[in-house]
Image: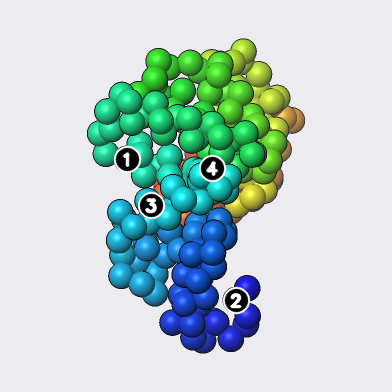
Amino acid sequence: KCGTGCASDPDRMIQLLSRASQLGDAEAKAKLGFLYEYGRIVKGDKKKAAQLYKEAALLGHPMGQFKYAESLSGGKPSAETMKEAMQWYQKSADQRCVQALFKLGLIYFEGIGQKADKPLAAQYFFEAARLGYPRAQYNLATMFAEGNGLNKDLYAAFYWFMQAAQRQDPAAQRRVAVCYAEGTGVDKNLVKAQEWLMKAAQNGDVIAARMLETSRYTQW
């Protein structure tokens, strides 16, 4: 374990993590992999990061499995490599890793190295959304709103947009504002529409900021 003193002694932290990794600690391997992947404290080394993620994955670490899958699927992987990546994504998803669930949703939604299957994508988005992952909540809401891979359901769309908006997703906050302004999936409420649009703009949503500059939206 790394005590509080490690925060001010990064060399000591690396030493302890490396020792734990050598002893077979999956969490330490995953953390070291992250540091090498992004060049935090240590010199960046993506190959070393991938090896550490693989070791963590083989020990059953869900984030290690996800990150190893990411290392395999990056760039232009062969069909065989992508097949292996999919197996690791699924192993991670089976352990309820929200990033893996979301990534599988994207893969099947967009048909990345696989045949597109939007109903299956919706299932993965739904599982990640239930676990509170805002990006999955937003994507699921959009599918409901557009009837894309799911039966169109404006009430379900509003529910999931709101879930993501409450987790500070700016695009979802903008969509909640539009729902209130137009009365889609929820009773029309121009005061709430204005409030949510302002939140979205404050959180960096460029489209929301532009909407606030137009007379149509400032009169809500």
The residue that disc 1 covers is 74
The picture places residue 16, in percent across and down from the top left corner, at: 52, 75
Q: Earlier in the sequence, mark 1 or mark 3?
A: 3
* C-beta proximity under 8 Å, tags 3 and 2: no
Q: Marks 3 and 4, Cα distance to the nearest angstrom?
A: 20 Å
Q: Amino acid at mark 1?
A: Gly
Q: Residue at x 51, y 44 (%)?
A: 58
Residue 45 locus on image (x, y percent): 30, 61
Marks 3 and 4: which is nearer the front? 3
Q: CA distance from mark 3 to mark 2?
A: 22 Å
Image marks 3 and 4: residues in contact by CB distance under 8 Å: no
Badge 4 is on which residue? 99
Horizontally, residue 82 falls left or right of residue 158, namely: left
Q: Earlier in the sequence, mark 3 or mark 2?
A: 2
- What residue does disc 3 label? 51
Q: Label 3 is placed on what type of residue?
A: Gln
Label 1 environment density (alpha carbons within 10 Å; few <14, some 14–19, many ≥20): few
**For the point 43% across and 59% down, which residue is it?**
33
